[in-house]
Amino acid sequence: MTDRITVRAPAKINLHLGVGGPREDGFHPLETVYTSIGLYDDVVARRSDSWSLTLDAASYVDAVGVPLDDSNVVAAAARALAGLHGHEVVAAVEIVKGIPVAGGLAGGSADAAAALVALDRLLDLQTSDDDLVRIAADLGSDVPFALYGGHALGTGRGEVVTPLPVSDGSLWWVVVPSTAGGLSTPAVYRHYDLLAPDASPVPAPATAVIEALGAGDVAALATALHNDLQSPAIDLRPDLGELIALGEASGALRGLVSGSGPTVVFLCAGADEARALAGVLQEDGRTALVANGPVAGAHLVNGL
Ligand code: C5P
């Protein structure tokens, strides 16, 4: 039996985010295509007689606002496992953040997914894959995808995940996190409802993105990228529109608000183009991170 386990989980980008009018429970029906990128959070779980949660972060990550009390989704993950197995789930857990705490990259969801796997393995709970995915969905709409990684179709409120075949080759991204005047996910969905009060309950289909992925055609994918939350996000934060225009004028194939924002991502033709664009944006005084994907979902990096 091991005393310490590290599980790594990736950030996500929505290549397509079709949003339908709200359901009776207030959530919005989605048709989304997730892709995972090589920015990661690690969850390190150690055996302990009592629960503790601490945090460390990469230099480019501003983690000041992350709560370490019971409201952290990692604590919720431990409670969910305890509820399922009918006994306490305690450990000393450290979150090591490499995913900007910026909104739109599902860093919290990555933590939740990594914590589920880390606690399950550390304490030898033998949770079935079905139960892990079900608990993940209860913790948040993006958490199941963080377990899968790769490319996947998301339906329901995003939590019903169907893996898509991963094409050869990588997608190269420049990720520009933004914390100033952060956009909360509920606020952006509310603004979507305000701007599109008659939205169909059926979200826009992801066909064009899925075809471009299947063909391995980056230029076609750039054209097909689609996010129904982009207009409301830019309406709330007009500077995001200016950032997208700057990136597209500086070599990106396409710029896009990531999820509900405010993080903006740029799809580039390749590694060299991504590095060059990141350089331009850094000279403009911004944090700009190069990441490629797709990558694996939550996985053990040591400890067994
Ligand atoms: O599931 P998650 O915790 O990510 O959702 C955060 C909030 O985002 C929800 O409380 C809801 O206001 C909004 N949301 C939504 N429709 C979705 C996903 C999230 O309205 N499909």
Image: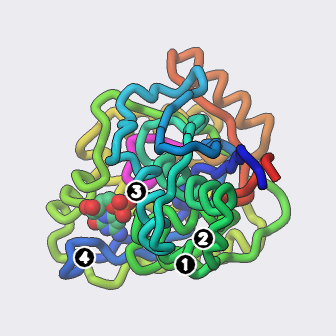
At label 2, counting other C-alpha atoms closer than 10 Å, the crowd grade (few under 14, some 14-19, many 20 or more) is many
Residue 13, percent from left and from top: 55, 55
Q: Which residues are magenta?
A: 259-265
- Where does label 1 land, which residue? 131
Type of the residue with mark 1: Asp
| Mark 1 residue element | helix
Instruction: Return the mark for residue 21.
Output: 4
Q: Residue at x 44, y 48 (%)?
A: 104
261 in magenta: yes
Predominant SS along the magenta part = loop
| Secondary element at image label 2 | helix
Q: Which residue is mark 3?
A: 76
At numbered mark 4, what does the secondary structure look like: helix, strand or loop? loop
Residue at horizontal 68 percent and vertical 70 percent from the top: 212
Cα–Cα gap, marks 4 and 3: 29 Å
Mark before the other along the chain sequence, 2 or 4: 4
The CA distance from mark 4 to mark 1 is 29 Å
Residue type at tag 4: Gly
The CB of the residue at mark 3 lies under 8 Å from ligand 1 = no
Looking at the rendered image, the quarter that the N terminus falls into is bottom right
The question of residue 175 being in magenta is answered with no
Q: Is residue 121 left or right of residue 54?
A: right
Mark with earlier residue (2, 1): 1
Classify residue 288 by image quadrant: top right
Q: Residues within 10 Å of mark 1 (few under 14, many from 20)?
A: few
Determine whether label 4 and label 1 are within 8 Å by CB. no
* Cα–Cα span, label 3 and label 2: 34 Å
